[in-house]
Each structure stands twice: as structure tokens, then as C-alpha cells.
Image (cartoon, rainbow, N blue to C red):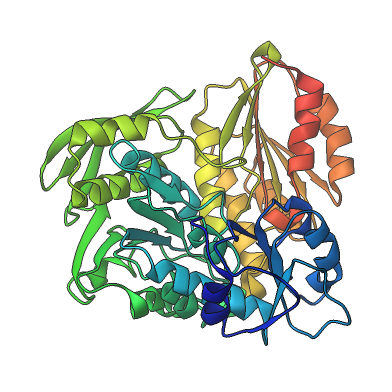
Amino acid sequence: MEALTIQQIVEAVHGKLLGEFSSTEPIVTRVETDSRTIHPGALFIPLVGERFDGHAYIDQALEDGAAGCLTQRERESYQPGKFYIRVENTRQALRDLAVWYRSQFRIQVVAVTGSVGKTTAKDMIASVLSEKFEVLKTDGNKNNDIGLPMTVLRLEKRHQIAVVELGINHPGEMDPLSDIARPDVVVMTNIGDSHIEAFGSRENTLLAKLEVFNHAQSGVYAVLNGDDPLLAPLKGRLPGTTVLCGKDQGCDYRAGELESDWRSQVSCQVKTPYGNGRMDIPALGGHMIYPTLMACAVGEWFGMDLEEIAAGVRNFAPTKMRMNILTRKDDITILDDGYNANPQSMRAAIEVLDGYAGEYKIAVLGDMFELGTMAGVLHAGVGQFLGKSHVDCLVAVGELAKNIYDAAVSSQVPECYYFETKEEAQLALHDMVRPGATILVKASRGMAFETITEYLKSITGEG
């Protein structure tokens, strides 16, 4: 972050300056919303939620080195040498500060959104662009109305391109995110069933996602999944230039001759408007052609050649818990894909497990949240999909996952086990794991399946 003056912050957040201080020179060098990570010279923004109020930690944050803070209320006393800025709402003030700060930079912004695969696409695009440019990207999947502003506030003069992820789970949330990002490039991965409980239908999900164009720059470049039946028809109907990526013959960026070693990578031939080339992708699953093609489209838009793009693809590293391949002793492999889950990503993960070169394949699957009245049917669909694979064993965990179990039994998956809790599942897994086993771990984030992954790591040892 570039240093800011107190006056700049006051004007950006429409606040009122309080406290006793001696200077309004540039002293704020970063913004923090977590009092546990305070650095000297930081501005502390105490956020307020249903179950927490960051105002309780203002004094501690200032004592730990914060230069000042925002506050929604007057205070009985003020620490000497610290500044306080009174605002109506600290969450809105964070957004206002990010909007103002973004306006101070002449920088190209790539905004990635969609139902599934946003983080993977963001990481792949950033990896490719980093071969030629100074790139700022969203950490992990910090893509909401807190994560996006915090990403934007990390911008520095050295950055040439920012690759940001925009995530929503309710109608109306995309417009304010778009106002912060002001994207030059919009990448849309797909339209699926994620958060369908709130949106009601895929069509409504699409309408909500399309708000990303409300504040896009003139001449915006849109990169869409051309194999998605809701996205493909948008070509020619959006502002600026639109290209499609996928397997379909009508796509501008296409992938073919897909090969996999089912250990560490997939490879494919890509055809672009500017040439053809081979891409070696250090990840598993046929679905990886989509972030790769999208990265090709973005890279070529910024003047990169296919050799540079291929190097960036080879250097791709997934965010933690996004199909990370953990090699253990006795030729045991853990496919750690436990960050989040929805019906589309579940099927993609099962396809990876199905093709993996393991002797005994176990799918440890948990609940998928925010599917509303469709939850039972969509979970059962995952169980039916398992029946079409070569997975040897299902371990279903959680209330909703009982639907996966029931459908898998009906679909004749060889071994099926159901447990209400992770603790019960772990006890059973202790006896199931054997040399040569490959174990997929996947569920919605709220299931906290990282505890299962850590348990599996503890009983298998380093490879």
C-alpha cells in the first residue's frame, strides 16, 4: 500500500476527525481489520457483525502500533498521538476507501467471477501474467465485500495489473464489488448451482453475475466459458469485446488432445486466434482446460505470446485445499480438495479420483451447503455419479451427505459407509487406508474437512 495522509482518509470515507495528534503527514502504510495482525503505521478498521464488534479491540490495536482507527461512535477518551475518524458504518467506509484508492491508480484490472472455479482461474491467470508483468492478485478466495477492498488496498505503484476475484452469494452484491474493481477485463468461469438457495435459479444467478459489467471500463474485454449454455449466447450482447473458451467448435479459444499422467499434470493442445501451442498444466482433471484457456485469452489480450503463456501455466500453483496432491508413504495419495463444494465441483473432483493411478480409491464426501430445496436431489446426483465411476469406496459424512450415501448404494458403488460426524469417519478411515490408496477429501467449507485431511496425514506419514 502507498502511504496515505489522514486528510486523504477523512475525505475518502466521508468522516469526522477526532483525537489528539500532531501531524497529518503520510503515516498510514497499511489497513487492518484484524486486531491480531496489527503492524506499525496501520489504520485499524473495526468491523461490526451479528456476533462480533471490532470496536472492542480499538485500544489494543492502537497500543500494538496502529496509527489510528475508524469508529462508528464517539469515545470517552482518546489515546495521545493517535487519530480517530468517525464514520456512520465502518464496513461501508472500508468500501469507500477502496473505491477512492483504486481511483488513484492507472492500472489494468482483471475481475474473475462465476459459480465454480473462480479461485483456480484467478491463480492461473495471475501465474501467466506474472511472466511479463508486476501482478497483484487476491489472496486465496478473499473475494467478498471485505476481501476485495483489502486486496485493492494492497496496490502499489509497481503493480501493472491486478487480478481480483469477485464472489457473491446473494442478489445485489455484485454491483458494489464492480464499483470497487472497475474492471478492464471480466472473466466468467460458468453458471452453476452454488448459492442457488439465495438466487432461486441459474438464470437468476446469471443476472446477478452480469452486474459485474455495471462499472466496467469502456471497451471491456469479456472472457466466457463457451461450453456453458447460459454464457455462450452472451457473445455479441455484452459491451466491448467478448471471446469464448472451451471445447465447442464455436469457441475462440479451444483445447484438444487432452492427456494426463494421472499423477501430477494434464496436457493439451490449445488453438487461439493467434496460434497453436501445447500446455502442460501442473494439476489434474479435464476441467483444468477452462482456466488454462481463459489465461491464454487474457495473456494474449495483454500482448503475451504462447511461449510466455505456457511458461506461466507450468508455474501455476493452486490455492491451499484446492485439489492439492499430497504424496504419502506406501504410495498413498491424498487429494485435498476440501475448501468448498457444489454439485459441479464434486463431479469434477470425482472424475480426478476416478482417473488417478491408485489401487484403491476412497471418496470422503461431506455436505454441500446453500442448495435450498434442491439439496436432497443435488446430493443424490453426486451419489449417482459415483456409481458411474471406478471409485471403490465412499465415506459420506454429514446430514445432507446421507443422500449421497443412499444414491451411491443404489448405484452399486462397491463399498459405502455413512457417518454423522467427522470423528466417526476418522475412526473408520484408520482401518480403510491401505498401501496404494488414493483418498479424495471434499465438502463445503462449513464442514471444516481440513481436520480429516490432517488426520489422514497423521496416519500415513511423509512420502
> Residue 412 sits in which quadrant?
top right
Q: Nearer the viewer, residue 229 or 209?
A: 209
Q: Where is residue 334 drawn, in percent x and y?
A: 65, 29
**If the image is split into quadrants, where does the C terminus sit?**
top right
* Residue closest to the far top: 330
Q: Where is residue 332 drawn, in percent x and y?
A: 66, 19
216 horizontally vs 361: left or right: left
Q: Where is residue 35 drawn, in percent x and y?
A: 77, 58
Answer above or below: position of 202 versus 296: below
Q: Nearer the viewer, residue 77 or 337?
A: 77
Q: Where is residue 36 drawn, in percent x and y?
A: 78, 53
Q: Nearer the viewer, residue 348 or 243?
A: 243
Answer above or below: position of 453 versus 185: above
Answer above or below: position of 14 versus 407: below
Which residue is at a point 74% across and 60% down the rendered structure image? 400
Answer above or below: position of 370 versus 286: below
Which residue is at a point 64% across and 58% down the rendered structure image? 380
> Residue 170 sits in which quadrant?
bottom right
Q: Nearer the viewer, residue 128 or 114?
A: 128
Query: How many marks do you count on the picture?
Result: 0
198 horizontally vs 284: left or right: right
252 horizontally vs 393: left or right: left
Q: Quick check: can you spot residue 202?
A: no
* Residue closest to the far front: 22
Which residue is at a point 59% across and 44% down the rendered structure image? 386
Q: Quick check: can you spot residue 223?
A: yes
162 horizontally vs 232: left or right: right
